[in-house]
Image: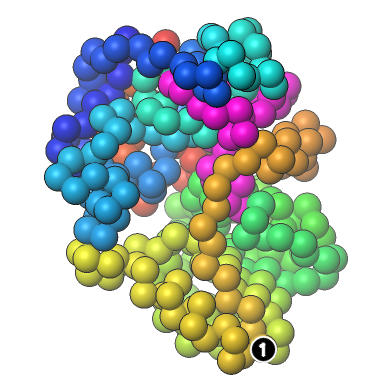
Amino acid sequence: MKAIVQDEYGPPHVLSLGEVPTPTPGAGDVLIRVHAAGVDYGVWHIMTGLPLIGRLGFGLRRPRNRVPGMDVAGVVESVGTKVTAFRPGDEVYGAATGTYAQFALARPGKLARKPANLSFTEAAAVPVSGVTALRAVGQVTAGEKVLVIGAGGGVGSFATQLAAAGGAHVTGVCSTAKADLVRSLGAQAVIDYTREPLTGTYDLIIDIAGIRPLTQLRGLLTERGRLALVGGEGGGRWFGGLGRPLAARLITPFTRHRLDALIVLTRTADLDALRDLIEAGSVRPAVGRTYPLAEAPTAVGDLAAGNAPGKLVITVD
């Protein structure tokens, strides 16, 4: 089958289109014919092998999995003997292994039925980013003030909609080019970080792949406000942006603020919840750009550059 392969760490050119064997499902696996796959920062980290501590999981000298990609939307091709939740022909979305390919393997607990009102391309934009946003927003109540830093990206576009759907007053932080998108997603106010500082007081701050100090963010919280850290860039080659999440966990017991450093796994229950919201019209994926499979290296490069609005998706013929 055709797939994007990677045999070393480095910039986007280490990704290339090649031929690899079609994976064979084990007893508990689902084999998916991939129609589309999302692009997220996890792919970038595995591509570059950064931060270096991540190689304990990715692979010390080269990636353990030659084919990158996690988000997936497609059709079940076959299932293992122990799989009862899905059958061939089912349209599904979720998280799988090696989705930048014509076929990918997944566990049933990481899949769900595809939203009926979405194309495969739109559905592939949902799993990782949508589930992460769902967990970051949590339960908001009408009238609460929510600040979403990085509102124009994959996770941020979902977080903005989810908070607005819960009745919160949402302020989105983004660049000038993404301001119109963020307003269209339900943000009542937009802060253009290229032109103005962060101001105001918020019950919930969702900081996506940010680098702002915890002291600055805590200064924007109400007395019992919550801060959700999603990802984190910057930092050194060894530990990257891990410093803030670690500090947040250490500080939390000694403050009235709730500081969460999220590590989110895609689960069927969350995918089902998102499907219900999507089919009800409360949430929609904001697909910024699409790329054919052969242009996956360009897609990952565009993600890292931060210029593309919404979620980037790779389409597979």
Q: Amino acid at mark 1?
A: Arg
User: Which residue is pictured at 41% across the width and 14% down the height?
Assistant: 24
* Residue underneath mark 1: 256
- Residue 187: name its quadrant: bottom right
Location of residue 92 in the rendering, given as x and y in whole percent from the top left corner: 62, 22
Location of residue 49 in the rendering, given as x and y in whole percent from the top left corner: 23, 49
Front residue of this view, candidates 64 and 103: 64
User: Which residue is pictured at 49% across the width and 83% down the height?
Assistant: 250
User: Which residue is pictured at 77% across the width and 64% down the height?
Assistant: 140
Question: Magenta span has 181?
Answer: no
5 sits left or right of 309 in the view: left
Answer yes or no: is residue 290 visible: no
Location of residue 62 with respect to 306 vertically, above or below:
above
Q: Which residues are magenta?
A: 104-133
Location of residue 8 in the rendering, given as x and y in whole percent from the top left corner: 15, 38
Farthest residue to the bottom: give it: 254
Q: At numbered mark 1, what does the secondary structure look like: helix, strand or loop? A: loop
Location of residue 291 in the rendering, given as x and y in whole percent from the top left corner: 38, 26
158 sits left or right of 55 in the view: right
Quadrant of image for the N terminus:
top left
Location of residue 84 with respect to 168 vertically, above or below:
above
Question: Magenta span has 116?
Answer: yes
